[in-house]
Amino acid sequence: ARKLLMIPGPIEFEPAILQAMAIPTTSHVAPNFIETFGNSLELMRTVWKAPKGQPFIIAGTGTLAMDMAAANLIEQGDNVLVISSGYFGQRYKDILDRSGANTTLLEAPLGENTPLETIEAALKTKSYKALTLTQVDTSTGILIDPKPIAELAKKYDVLTIVDGVCSVAAEELNQDEWGLDVVLTASQKAVGVPPGLALLMVSEKAMNVWKNRKTAVPNYYADWSNWLPVMQAYEDRRPSYFGTPAVNLVVALETSLKIICKEGMDKRVKRHLDLAKAFRAAITALNLKTLPTTALAANTLTAIYYPEGIDGAAFNAKMNDNDIIIAGGLLPDIKATYFRIGHMGSVSANDLMAVLGALERTLAQLGHAFEIGKGLQTFQTEILKLN
Ligand code: PMP
């Protein structure tokens, strides 16, 4: 039977986007492709709400986008504050350490957000060049509100770098108004394009910090000196070359960004919020517990503990038998205790009904105590309240 891919990326992609990819590959300087690339850069500004931002579309994954921001903005010995709510915060620390930064990790207790007072206290201790935060940490399903943190960063003259891999094009984002310096993502999540593109939007302020570096960017591929002229050329609809772009993925990206902009970001954010809220209510009705406790819960995925006495591997396999593919845990220490369900991109209420149906069957088959139909009923009731 047909299975639904409900992990937190890659997601189920729209048929129109997959079809767009299937064109015969053109030259990267063919007029049509120049237009597609230029359009994609412009549409990114609408999605990020960054009319003044400098967009980059690079072949690579989200980790490359993280690496690029670090390599271009950080120099040997710079102080960087890493605000972490899970696995990907730790990854940013690892990347920054490798870039020669002097990092301070602020790790939130499991299931919680780091209080603003703690962040401000850290910012007072030394002069930081930048701070990083993960808007949605995919390992915990925790959402960080970048806005008040960016305000603090501004007060202390610190750059704000946002890992938006699991949030851009789904969670609320207003890059220019909030004063975010880099917001980066990858194609395979809420942007809705198969894996392979690293996407960054950089503020004027951060571009100036980069221009005024004292030392060369240590990594050749990552260096914006190589990529900025290419991005500018595509926007001016001129041919250009540094490294061959992922032609078919960029064609898919233009298609997806057009779909996203047609829906409108405000509507899209609300759809994710409404569906996530109803889904969490259903999860609670099934006597399941989510990982975020006092933290804000992400609207792009939900991290849920396996019920007591149920083996995780058996549960995941049963869900697969019931035609829903979910993800296991990712935080090394508690990996085996929880699972994750993605709900981003073009996800609908019907998709989540299918997930809840499979989840109820799985739980019943494995002997979990709950009232069958309760999750589905709760979800329907919550969704109907919206209309
Ligand atoms: N940051 C976050 C928040 C992520 O969810 C991911 C991917 N799961 C990454 C970074 C890394 O992205 P990629 O796997 O595309 O390198």
Image (spheres, rainbow, N blue to C red):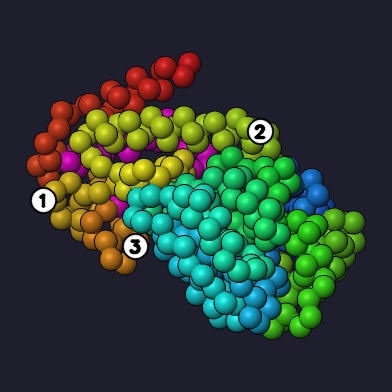
Taking the image as shown, residue 89 lies to the left or right of residue 201, namely left
Which residue is disc 3 drawn over? 331
SS assignment at label 2: loop
Residues marked 1 and 2 touching at CB (< 8 Å): no
Which residue is disc 1 drawn over? 309
Q: Does residue 317 belong to the magenta stretch?
A: no
Residues marked 1 and 3 touching at CB (< 8 Å): no
* Marks 3/2: CA–CA distance: 34 Å
Q: Which residues are magenta?
A: 339-363
Which residue is disc 2 drawn over? 264
Which residue is depicted at the point 54% across and 73% down?
103
SS assignment at label 1: loop
Q: Does residue 341 belong to the magenta stretch?
A: yes
* Crowd rating for badge 1 (residues with CA inside 10 Å; few <14, some 14–19, many 20+): few
The kind of residue tagged 1 is Gly
Across and down, in percent, residue 295 comes to 40, 45
